[in-house]
Each structure stands twice: as C-alpha cells, then as structure tokens.
Image (cartoon, rainbow, N blue to C red):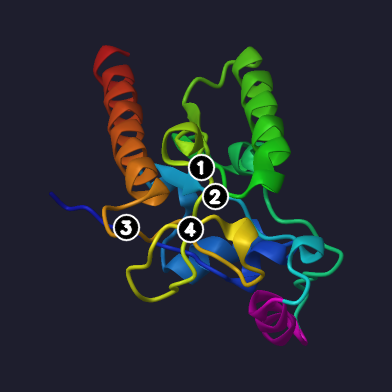
Amino acid sequence: QNIFIYGVFNSPLVYSPRWAELLPEYLFIRSLDSLDVIVLGNFNAYHESANTTFLLLMKNLTAGTDADFERGSSPEVDDLANIYSGPILTVGMFNQHSESQFNTTVYKIKSLEKHGRRNIVAINARQYVSYIGECATDGVETIGTCINPKLRRNPHHRCMGENGGHTDLVAWDIAEEIRNLLVRENQKTWVG
C-alpha cells in the first residue's frame, strides 16, 4: 500500500520558533506537503508539567537550543494549517484540564472553515468517559486494572486496561477519520 507513518513524540522541536522548518528535517522529508495527512495531538505545556519526568526531559533536550519549553508555545491547528494545505486530524488529550484546549481547537477549526478550509477534523478523546468512566491504570508498561485516579496520588495512564480502554476506542476513531479525510481529498482530485 506504500504507507509510511511518521511519529514525533516528546520532541523539543515543537517548542522552537523554527518548528515548521525543523519538522521536515526531523522526519527526513522534503516538505510537509509531501504527507497525505497529519494527525496533530496536544503538546504538554510547561505549567502542566510540574514535578514530572517530562519537564526534566524537555529541560535537558532544549538546553543550548532555540527551543524554549518554559516560555515558548507549541504549534496549534491554525499554525499548522498556515503551512500545510493537506488534511489535518486533531486529537485532544484524555485529561480533564485539557477540555478547554480542545474547545479552543474546535473554535479555531470552525474559523478556518469560514475561510474555506474544509479538510480539518477534531476528535474529542474524552468522548467515551461517560461510557467507560474516569478510570485509569497506574501500570505504565503493563496491562493494569482500571481504577479511579482520585484514589491514588501517582500519575495514571488511560491507555491501559485488560479489555482495552480510551485509547483503543480513540484509535479506531482516528483510523476512521483518516480514511474519511483521504477519501474526501481523493474525490476532490478526481472531480476537480
């Protein structure tokens, strides 16, 4: 099928003012426009990362670079839409405090639609909480039991569970929306 999937996780380049220039280099591609679709998640902010290993990692990785994790901002959907004309799928985070960020993303997408951009879709990763509950596991690399994170003080992951979990459901949504975006994009090419 000639499918390539590139992933950028926990990379300091998104905190650089030159992220748009650095990203194609990081992925070893000529330009972002050579990609068929981009799935954009949320990037952790400095103020959300207090007392985490992620904070230490970013401080170490950004030392001596122009990436400013503490005061800089990472790209959002409108920033990406300004430099990439292909389909974009945004996916929110599971945690409660990022709901307002997801709502802001949806607002930005609607604004882009008013200006003619029709190939951007958002998935709310919290849409299944009312069915599954607000549970998570403290097993980071194992299949854990889904427990209420309020009962414990240590960090939890929503991506684990004996019978799957939030991310399994969202992964299916992502696959379906990528397909929908690509079908629409191909129809545009065939028709016009």
- What's under tag 1, amino acid-wise? Val
Q: CA distance from mark 4 to mark 3?
A: 33 Å
Closer to viewer: mark 4 or mark 2:
4
Determine whether label 4 and label 3 are within 8 Å by CB. no
Query: Image point 75% across, 72% down: which residue?
Result: 67
Rate crowding at label 1 as few (under 14), some (14 to 19) or many (20 or more) other CA atoms within 10 Å. many
Which quarter of the picture shows residue 46? bottom right
Q: Mark 2 and 1 residues: CB-CB less than 8 Å, in contact?
A: yes
Lower position in the chain sequence, tag 4 or tag 2: 2
For residue 41, the mark is 2
Q: Earlier in the sequence, mark 4 or mark 3?
A: 3
Residue range highlighted in magenta: 52-64
Earlier sequence position, callout 3 versus callout 2: 3
Q: Which residue does the numbered mark 1 point to in the structure image?
A: 91
Relative to 119, residue 145 above or below: below
Estimate the x, y position of residue 19 in percent, counting from the top left: 65, 61
**Mark 2 neighbour class, 10 Å CA radius: few under 14, some 14 to 19, many 20 or more:** some
Mark seen at residue 5: 3
How far across and down, in percent of the image, does residue 14 sit?
A: 65, 62
Q: Secondary structure at mark 3?
A: loop
